[in-house]
Amino acid sequence: MTINHRTALITGASAGIGAAFAHLLAKEGYALLLVARRTERLQELAEELAKKYNVRCDVCATDLSDPTAPASIIAYAQSKGIGIDVLINNAGLSGKTAFADTPWIKLAAEIQLMVTAVTELCHLVLPGMKARGWGRIINLSSIAAFSPPGASLLYTGIKSYVLDISQSLDMELKPQGIHVTALCPGFTHSEFHDAMGTRDAANKLPNILWQDAEDVVSEGWHAVMSGKPVCVPGTVNKIIASSIRPLPVTWQYFLGNRLNPFKEH
């Protein structure tokens, strides 16, 4: 491991894909600023990585559904003298109840977490990246961005936005040494479905559809370092994504309405 004097900010870092990114980047010698809601989990991970890889690990426990969170994270980094060279926008969730029956405060929190905070953090880290002439941003989209919309879900629309905005930013910023990649995993072994209460439905899906977080992260990191604006990890996911996108809109609507594995029938 070689210390490279660059720092990565990772949101949703306490478990799953976020924690896997933390391990990979620490192994690569990056200092880390880990962000999630669970202070104790963050501290444990930071201590583990600092000891194992001899890198600096700072933590900032905050809830990105709070509109003040992105600015407070960057203010914290600045107070510690930390410049952000790598941004991993990983934090996310998905609602599982009918849109009309969900309190607006919960819907607004979902949008804040996965649309506004993602976009704002990109905007906040870019001045430093542009000044240094180097930066890497990975925004967690999903194979859902290629899929038909799901009944009641904001998730597919949100992940489609993340896919599109990542490509737009990459077009703008690549000439300045900054790569932006939309990482679009499919079903990934993590705590996501436990947190969303969809574990029983997820367990019924075929094993061939699942990937380990470490494999997703490895492909995503290789993609952003190679300058690829979109990464769909895994052969099965690539086949699914490439086969769904060309379908007529009416067919996508039908499939999204009929084949959503998490829809309550």
Image: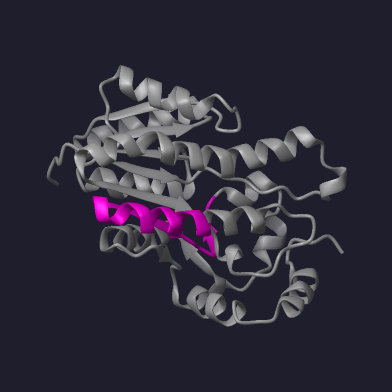
Residue 123 in which image quadrant: top left
Up/down of 45 relative to 172, above or below:
above
Up/down of 101 relative to 189, above or below:
above
Query: Does residue 7 appear anywhere in the picture?
Result: no
Q: In the drawing, does residue 103 fall left or right of residue 23?
A: right
Q: In the drawing, does residue 65 fall left or right of residue 134?
A: right
Query: Does residue 257 appear anywhere in the picture?
Result: yes
Query: Residue 249's spot in the image, x, y percent?
Result: 72, 76
Up/down of 149 relative to 81, above or below:
below
Q: Which residues are magenta?
A: 163-190
Q: Is residue 37 magenta?
A: no
Query: Residue 3's spot in the image, x, y percent?
Result: 14, 40
Could you tell me which residue is drawn at 27 percent across and 58 percent down? 225
Tally of numbered discs: 0
Its colouring scheme is: one colour
- Name the foreground residue: 38 vs 118: 118
Could you tell me which residue is drawn at 40 percent across and 34 percent down? 124
Seen as rendered, the residue at the extreme top is 79
Q: In the drawing, does residue 155 fall left or right of residue 38?
A: right
Q: In the drawing, does residue 203 fall left or right of residue 131?
A: right
Could you tell me which residue is drawn at 33 percent across and 27 percent down? 58
Query: Residue 248's spot in the image, x, y percent?
Result: 69, 81
Q: Is residue 170 magenta?
A: yes
- Name the foreground residue: 54 vs 242: 242
Seen as rendered, the residue at the extreme left is 2
Residue 240 in which image quadrant: bottom right
Query: Residue 194's spot in the image, x, y percent?
Result: 64, 48
Residue 201 in which image quadrant: bottom right
